[in-house]
Image (tube, rainbow, N blue to C red):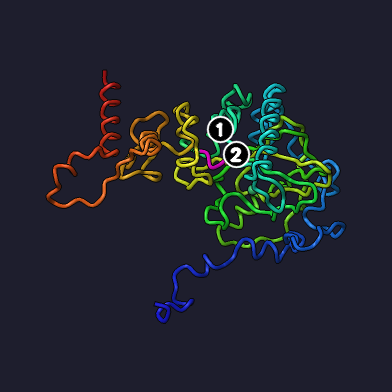
Amino acid sequence: MAAHSPPEAQLYTDFLGSGEPWKSMYRSNPWLLPPDTRKPLEWGTGRYWDTTVARKHPYWKDVALPTPTQEIETLRQNLREWGFCLIEEGLSPAQLETFRTRLFEQVEGERLAGVDMPTPSGQYVNTLINKGRCFMQCIEQNPESVQAGPVIEQLLDETLGPGWICHSFLSNGSDPGGYPQALHIDQGPMAPFLTTEAPALVNTMYIPQDVNEENGGTLLIPGSHKIMAEAGSGGEIGELPPTINLEAKAGTILMFDGRLVHGTGANKTDKQRFVATMSNVKSWMRQQENWILSVSPEVLAEASPKLLHRMGFQALTYGSTIEGFGMGAPGRVGDAWGNLKCFREAYDRGEYVRVGELSSHPSEQELERPYTIKRANEMVKAARKESKK
Ligand SMILES: [Fe+2]
């Protein structure tokens, strides 16, 4: 095979091996190169982490960049024009208190238990869905835990189209003395989905304490979603405008386009700083978090049809089918057809029976095995019968 597969004979090598848009982005903007994490972080040389908040930035201070608001029309315009918008008091003071207390307790607990996830930027807290009711309800955009829930849902419906699911919900720390993240876009490690029309991923960032240029406020390049999309898949990037640090009060919610260039900022204070990032994607995309396995039985037992759908438990033709179950299903919230919960519950009980090799003359015992797929199909039939009543 190797002798018959020289690089020039292979399919799509120009596109897949182009290294774009990153190659041209770094060539045109060397100040965007990530730091060498073996050396102390450099300041005063104009690198991307060495910046400030928009209102103090010489390039951005006179530009009308998004500021926190509850006006949906402004949120729409900001998201379209700048690739991000800020929802003022997305969490009410009481919701913020619950969220912050739970998150900071978890941060401490995970460190003490030795299950924390350190990164060059700071501590991460993964799989928030299992770590507090408030987090689970944020995934549902339930107004009980996030008062801006209906606004977020509306904007996600508009940007991702119906049927979108949750990709992940985790907390990113920026630790004192940590390194900034390399700037990136969340819509995939390369750019196969870069289209000018709309994003395929949208982030919702919960901000549990004030963030600014001092404590590692997220680095953003306003409007870069358009530049990336206009370059297109495999296209080249010219000079980019400078980064800003996100400035926002605790309780604000940042929504941003999956094509926006961003990354965790460097924390110059002596306190850890956390934000919690939720990504949402098209229904057919692979999720960052494999909740099918990781969600706790307790959360699963209580999960609403909406939460099941968001976690990827609602199989459809394009994704997550189990032994053919879900093939052809439209992926609707609450539909018995494609609902994978019974497979996971059978698995948890140690009773998941898969269909394996069968001979053309199966034994009596093989014919009578309690195959889980049979049970799942029966449940769909029963639900259909019920709905016809
Ligand atoms: Fe990111």
Q: Main secondary structure of the magenta part?
A: strand
Find residue 100 and report its image quarter: top right
Q: For mark 1, what is the residue?
A: 139
Q: Which quarter of the rendering shows the N terminus? A: bottom left
Q: Are the residues at dot 2 and dot 1 in contact (C-beta closer than 8 Å)?
A: yes
* Residue visible at 69% across and 46% down in the picture: 123
Three-letter code, disc 2: Met
Please tell me which residue lies in front, 11 or 351: 351
Q: Which mark is residue 278?
A: 2
Return the residue found at the far front.
113
Find residue 56 and report its image quarter: top right
Boundaries of the magenta span? 166-170
Judged left or right of residue 387, residue 265 is right
Three-letter code, disc 1: Ile
Judged left or right of residue 267, residue 200 is left
Residue 185: image x %, image y %?
63, 51
